[in-house]
Image (cartoon, grey):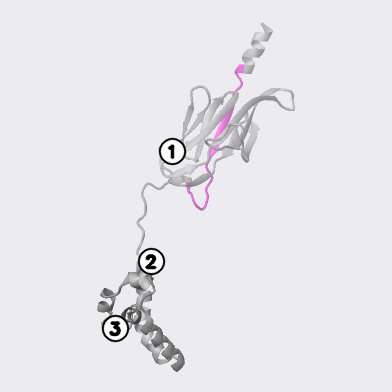
Amino acid sequence: TLLSLLSLSTTCLSARLTLHIPTTPNLNPSTLPPTTHAILQSSGTPQTALLTRSNTFLFQNVTSGSYLATIYSRDHHFEPLRIDVNVEKNEAGEKVERVHAWQTFLGNEWGNKGEERGSGDGSKGVVIEVKAVGGKQYFTERGGFSPLSFLKNPMILMALFSMVLIFGMPYLMENMDPEMKAEFEEMQKTSPLGGGANPAQSIQNFDLASWMAGKTDTGAAS
């Protein structure tokens, strides 16, 4: 009978857990919608708590075990927490529910615990702060018009380079050294596309096969 009473008292031990959302420069918890709620989930039936006016979620009668605490909100993401409730002895030798909270990571192993978020005696109530990760975005913002985006287009860069050659080449020819100018004119004469009055006609009459074979008009005439 004594053993049954001891086991009954052990199973009746429960902790009181409170999740608190602090006020930060990026989030005022008073503006959260009333549908914001927290879920404490383990192998059994999950427990649900709604957001109170004091920006908290209250869980009563939390028994021993390991839990995943998740906050669901319409506008913000919150970090998930791992909550462990264990039966330990206090300084007076009494058995109490000890609560420990750590940061956890979804998709990783359950034993991969992050930074500790708090701990305390569950019989007296433990308050754990939950941090907001960021806001939710349901729509993609349309990119604005930027004149600099034209410079990232290769076709625009090629057109600008061609304009510089067209309008800048006469100016360069006028200021060119006479010897260099004569050498440049000689190169134009020997060029397969140069020497004609009509550039379009020169391109049409250009024989690519003969030019690749090293033949010239002089060599063909001889």
> Which amino acid type is shown beneath numbered disc 2?
Pro
Q: Secondary structure at mark 1?
A: loop
Q: Quadrant of the C terminus?
A: bottom left
Q: Circle 2 is placed at which residue position?
A: 154
> Which amino acid type is shown beneath numbered disc 1?
Thr
First of labels 1, 2 by sequence position:
1
Q: Dot 2: few (<14), some (14–19), or many (≥20) neighbours within 10 Å?
A: few
Q: Residue at x 36, y 73 (%)?
A: 211
Q: Secondary structure at mark 3?
A: loop
Residue 135 or residue 173, whichever sits in front: 173
**1 vs 2, front mark:** 2
Q: Does 135 sit left or right of 116 as displayed?
A: left
Is residue 209 visible to the viewer in this orientation of the structure? Answer: yes
Dominant secondary structure, magenta: loop
Give coordinates of residue 204: x percent, y percent: 26, 74
Q: Circle 1 is placed at which residue position?
A: 36
Q: Residue at x 40, y 66 (%)?
A: 152
> Which amino acid type is shown beneath numbered disc 3?
Gly
Q: Is residue 175 above or below residue 42?
A: below
First of labels 3, 1 by sequence position:
1
Whole-number angstrom distance, CA of label 3 to CA of label 2: 31 Å
Q: Quadrant of residue 113?
A: top right
